[in-house]
Amino acid sequence: MAEHDRGCGVSRIPGRVPTTPPTLADVAELAGVSRQTVSNAVNNPDLLRADTLERVQEAIDELGYSPNRAARNLRTRASHLIGLRINPAQEGTANALMDRFVHSLVETSREAGYHVLLFAADHEDPLSGYDDLLRSTAVDAFVITDTYLGNPQAAWLESRRAPFVAFGRPWGVDEPRHPWVDVDGAAGSELATNHLLDRGHHRIAWIGWRKDSWIGEDRRAGWSRALRARGLPTTGLASRVEDTVASGREASAVLLDEAHPSAFVCASDTLAMGVLHTLAERGLVPGRDVAVVGFDDSQVAQVVPPGLTSVRQPLEEVAVEVVKALEGLLGHPPYVGPGVLLAPTLAIRGSC
Amino acid sequence: MAEHDRGCGVSRIPGRVPTTPPTLADVAELAGVSRQTVSNAVNNPDLLRADTLERVQEAIDELGYSPNRAARNLRTRASHLIGLRINPAQEGTANALMDRFVHSLVETSREAGYHVLLFAADHEDPLSGYDDLLRSTAVDAFVITDTYLGNPQAAWLESRRAPFVAFGRPWGVDEPRHPWVDVDGAAGSELATNHLLDRGHHRIAWIGWRKDSWIGEDRRAGWSRALRARGLPTTGLASRVEDTVASGREASAVLLDEAHPSAFVCASDTLAMGVLHTLAERGLVPGRDVAVVGFDDSQVAQVVPPGLTSVRQPLEEVAVEVVKALEGLLGHPPYVGPGVLLAPTLAIRGSC
DNA sequence: TGCTGTCCTTGGATCGATCAAGTCGGCATG
DNA sequence: CATGCCGACTTGATCGATCCAAGGACAGCA
């Protein structure tokens, strides 16, 4: 015999540092069963008789056994890792969306037995990171988060038949073959606009993103829909700019001078902060003199005085749906469900 | 022969979906060399003659070969993954420190050939996540980030002889046996206080954390050191509270009434935002009537009107040092260097 | 001719788990 | 009584890269 004479085991010799973690074979020997039976005890407990299962379980506990991931991955051709690319940090914006989403995703995927692997975007070739991880079978699937402007990753991953789920609709694509989860941006700004209308505002301005941004146009549609539903005009009340504080500041200054709105709805908290800058410069008090609503419910919105009302994306739900879609995608047989569109809520604070 | 008749290769049959990724043996066959030589080409290129290396490289490129991670991990007993636990998101604070750090860490560790694996803290047992990953040999090392209040993870990981690097000093420990990287908090608030002193302020208040926070006391020491260096008193000018916006608001209100400071230095941006709340309520303008300095240079500090001056931690450098320490730790033989203390800078904005 | 060293090949064994096929006793069925 | 089937478990092969030991081919040098 003497298959293993290397003194394995964590708790065999108390006080001594383990040389090697215990293996399945060690557990099998201790429990007096075969390796396969231990494997089944871990992965298909219902195949064992109750008393055998208990005996194996005791051996597992005694040795502190935990299956070696590399070995399992090699055999099953799966890593139980999900790749998530994080984009270069954008300083000077209120964009903390990812942070909350990453948290939710990590926690949700843990419950499904997955871990999240982060990787950075290569500056020259945005696809190299994906390619690398895919070919070396380091991850089972990807979650992609930036689907604005007809994201190249999605098309590329599709052509490679790489499993992935998108947080964000495949804008401009007729028949997406991949699962996606998104939040209804139009519903969000409609919610915000209606809230302002209910509080008596009539002239509500919009500050959004450039016209080539699908997301921006979607959010804008909610604003105009709400106004038109009450027979109110929208002309002259909208501005489309870059997503920076400075742009929001300038746009709001111009709108205040030319269109005299009593409230602003913005496509992002970053733009809304720009509005707050203009108000501060003019000695106007947000919420009293002019109402402001942002989008994304960032930390900034939560802590800035007097509190910025903001459309909140249900990122916890998004994560749940993303993981569900991943499980479908990686199941046998793979299942691709329809896209999921979730409704945002409104976090109401002092700015309106 | 017919060792492999499964039709491997990505680009062998253009247009067809690859069944299995190419293996080392496939590359060897195509290049007309042995497996060992291909392995050497990948891992020890200097062992090969230049022309052979080139031939192998061509074969690798043609097949799109990338070593199977699981197989490599199994054999070498290393995963090239670094575990990073992310803490539950704190809403309502300006705490975006982690976000920036994670970015830096991911990018830096990629250059060193590592990826970052995220995992969540179990709510009941904060150590279970570590234990799990460690025993299943899923990660090579950990980076731990919260060393306040004599962190239990550090002691636990040390006792398990698990390799890890701490972002944060091992407060209250005489001889740490693990590498650490930290930012000099006292130097940060001293920098902030001196900046205010140079601008003519004499009565500078401090709002910090509870006394049992090592980090809080460290940062506070910089403030008192700066004042004492100019012979100015500190009594009655300091307040120690929880790290919330509400606490900062209350503390600043009390201090304004009782001690009449012309400036505030805070242990965090969250507390500084509390001060801004108080100022807004009283119609005071930050930067003109009262100066405020925060700590961490969060997104909030960057976008709030009129801009919050804040102590900025050099997180990019921290990440570089952390990865350096990791490489030492995982090298042969392992090398544990001394702790690294980095100096923060001051991001000056409109609030002072 | 013999010796040394470089560069590469050969044929294994190995890491630790899982898969596919097979063994064995017991029970039911025709 | 032979046959088939089922549950519970065992056995040998396998995933793909790396490590190891031994050895062959060839060039340069003495």
Image (cartoon, coloured by chain):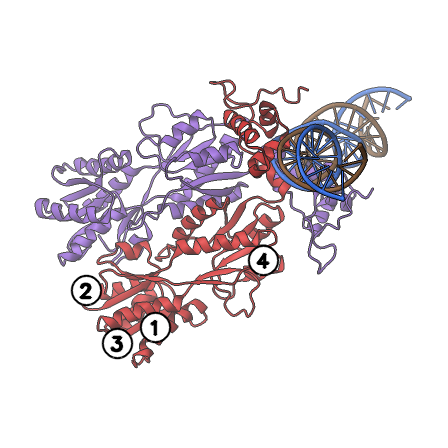
Chain colours: A red, B purple, C blue, D brown
Left or right? Give the position of B90 relative to B234.
right
Mark positioned earlier in the residue sequence (1 or 2): 1
**Spatial CA span between label 3 and label 1:** 12 Å
Location of residue B149 in the rendering, given as x and y in whole percent from the top left corner: 30, 32
Q: The disc numbered 2 marks a residue on which chain? A: A
The kind of residue tagged 4 is Leu
Residue at 59%, 52% (x, y): give it.
A131
Name the residue carrying label 3: A203
**Spatial CA span between label 1 and label 4:** 34 Å
The image shows a total of numbered marks equal to 4
Do marks 1 and 4 share a subunit? yes
Which is closer to the viewer, label 1 or label 2? Answer: 1
**Most foreground residue, B70 or A40:** A40
Left or right? Give the position of A341 relative to B350.
right
Name the residue carrying label 2: A285
**Spatial CA span between label 1 and label 2:** 23 Å
Q: SS at mark 3?
A: loop
Q: The disc numbered 4 marks a residue on which chain? A: A
**Most foreground residue, B47 or A348:** A348
Name the residue carrying label 4: A157
Q: Are marks 1 and 2 in contact (CB under 8 Å)?
A: no
Q: The disc numbered 1 marks a residue on which chain? A: A
Mark positioned earlier in the residue sequence (3 or 1): 3
Name the residue carrying label 1: A223
Q: SS at mark 2?
A: loop
